Image: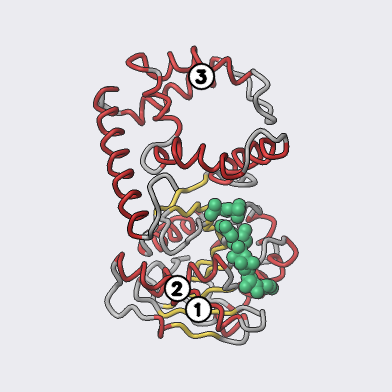
């Protein structure tokens, strides 16, 4: 089966926070968009959200012919998907609801049209269980706001064809995104596993009266959050090991993982785990020295700080706000 990768018509089912973000992104990329949502007043709410997002999309640059007027809101699931080249479901996070909805979507859609779901953690093998042609069904988990953040996690289920995963990656790339193929179908995928660990600890800190929500947000905003926009945890910690890199870092800070700071059980630090982390970060480091990477990190940090500062000033905030 050859799946459609050059798309002109994008179908969006569910037009809440995430669905409207997909609609905005697709419109900005010059596509025709057909949307459906069963809530009363959904069309007006969707158009208002698009209007709110449009100035940012204009600043980022629109594709030729891009216009909010190319959005058509329809009355049924079937009408929404019938002629679509690509379909993205962003309905509420309930297994029973998604199971029914995907049976309906897939029965009405063209078999060569990829169907993506925005689910943030349900497993595709579960909610695509009753889908027709499940080989074209994937998860495409985006991040809010969908029209600006590039990451989309692509996950196949037991019946998904590898070619469909590839086709979805092509389509999301054409929409200006940065797809990340999650090779194993695990709850929460990659990003939400990480975000939920942080979230769980943050809630414990509030619950125990250690810090306010604002203080916890400050702990992220003025520290690791600035780094994370350009360098992830593994490479950051490689630099924290100095010239000796990740192996020294693991020796120095690894034992802290066993201290009762966390409410999450820590993994056992086996030699195999340490080797995997060291090898992985060595690959990320490539041929660059720690000093080179430090200069890269510092330049990025300054650029991010300057950008955040200037944008805050423009909106009437002090840098420390
Ligand atoms: N909010 C977030 O930060 C993120 C959410 N997601 C995922 O996106 C999906 C949608 O979440 P949100 O947009 O946040 O929820 P939301 O509550 O903002 O929007 C859900 C929309 O679905 C509509 N809806 C209700 N029943 C429906 C049905 N049977 N079929 C189709 N649409 C229906 C609702 O009227 C509403 O407009 C979920 O699967 C969620 O896990 C993914 C990434 C981030
Ligand atoms: C809260 N959430 C799990 C729905 C968040 C996401 O899935 C991604 C995001 O935008 O943070």
Res. 287 image quadrant: top left
Mark 1 secondary-structure assignment? helix
Q: Position of residue 181 (x, y in %)?
A: 47, 48
Task: Name the disc covering residue 52, or none.
Answer: 2
Residue 291 vertical placement versus 149 (above, below): above
User: Which quadrant would residue 195 be assigned to in this image?
Assistant: top right
Q: Are marks 1 and 2 in contact (CB under 8 Å)?
A: yes
Depth check: 207 or 272 in front? 207
Q: Report the residue at 40% width, 22% height from top.
A: 240
Please state which of the two labelled residues, at mark 3 or mark 1, is closer to the viewer: 1
Q: Are marks 3 and 1 in contact (CB under 8 Å)?
A: no
Sequence-wise, the earlier of marks 3 and 2 is 2
Question: Residue drawn 68% across and 21% down?
Answer: 260
Question: Sequence-wise, which precedes: disc 3 or disc 1?
Answer: 1
Q: Which sits in the foreground, 163 or 16? A: 16
Question: Which element is circle 3 on?
Answer: helix
Name the residue beneath numbered marker 1.
48
Name the spot of residue 230 as percent of width and height, x first: 36, 41
Q: CA distance from mark 3 to mark 1?
A: 50 Å
Which structural element holds mark 2? helix
**Observer able to see residue 157:** no
Residue 46 vs 123, above or below: the answer is: below
In front: label 3 or label 2: 2
Q: Is there CB contact under 8 Å for labels 3 and 2?
A: no
| Furthest residue toward right | 96
């Amino acid at each position: 089966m050859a799946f459609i990768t050059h798309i002109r018509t994008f179908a969006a089912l569910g037009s809440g926070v995430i669905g409207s973000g997909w609609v905005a992104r697709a419109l900005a990329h010059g596509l025709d968009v057909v949307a459906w949502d069963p809530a009363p007043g959904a069309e007006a709410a969707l158009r208002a959200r698009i209007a709110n997002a449009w100035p940012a999309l204009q600043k980022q640059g629109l594709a030729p012919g891009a216009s909010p007027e190319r959005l058509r809101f329809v009355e049924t699931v079937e009408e929404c998907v019938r002629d679509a080249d690509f379909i993205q479901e962003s309905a509420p996070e309930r297994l029973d609801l998604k199971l029914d909805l995907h049976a309906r979507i897939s029965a009405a859609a063209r078999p060569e049209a990829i169907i993506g779901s925005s689910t943030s953690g349900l497993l595709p093998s579960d909610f695509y269980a009753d889908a027709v042609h499940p080989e074209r069904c994937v998860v495409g988990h985006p991040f809010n706001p969908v029209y600006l953040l590039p990451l989309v996690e692509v996950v196949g289920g037991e019946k998904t064809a590898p070619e469909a995963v590839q086709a979805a990656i092509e389509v999301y790339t054409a929409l200006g995104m940065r797809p990340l193929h999650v090779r194993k179908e695990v709850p929460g995928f990659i990003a939400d596993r990480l975000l939920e660990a942080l979230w769980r600890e943050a809630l414990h800190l509030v619950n125990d009266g250690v810090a306010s929500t604002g203080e916890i947000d400050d702990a992220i905003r003025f520290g690791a959050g600035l780094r994370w926009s350009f360098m992830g945890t593994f490479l950051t910690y490689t630099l924290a090991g100095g010239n000796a890199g990740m192996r020294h870092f693991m020796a120095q800070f690894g034992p802290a993982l066993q201290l009762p700071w966390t409410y999450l059980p820590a993994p056992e630090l086996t030699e195999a785990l340490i080797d995997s982390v060291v090898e992985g970060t060595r690959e990320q480091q490539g041929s660059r020295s720690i000093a080179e990477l430090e200069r890269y990190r510092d330049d990025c940090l300054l650029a991010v700080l300057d950008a955040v500062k200037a944008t805050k000033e423009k909106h009437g905030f002090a840098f420390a706000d």
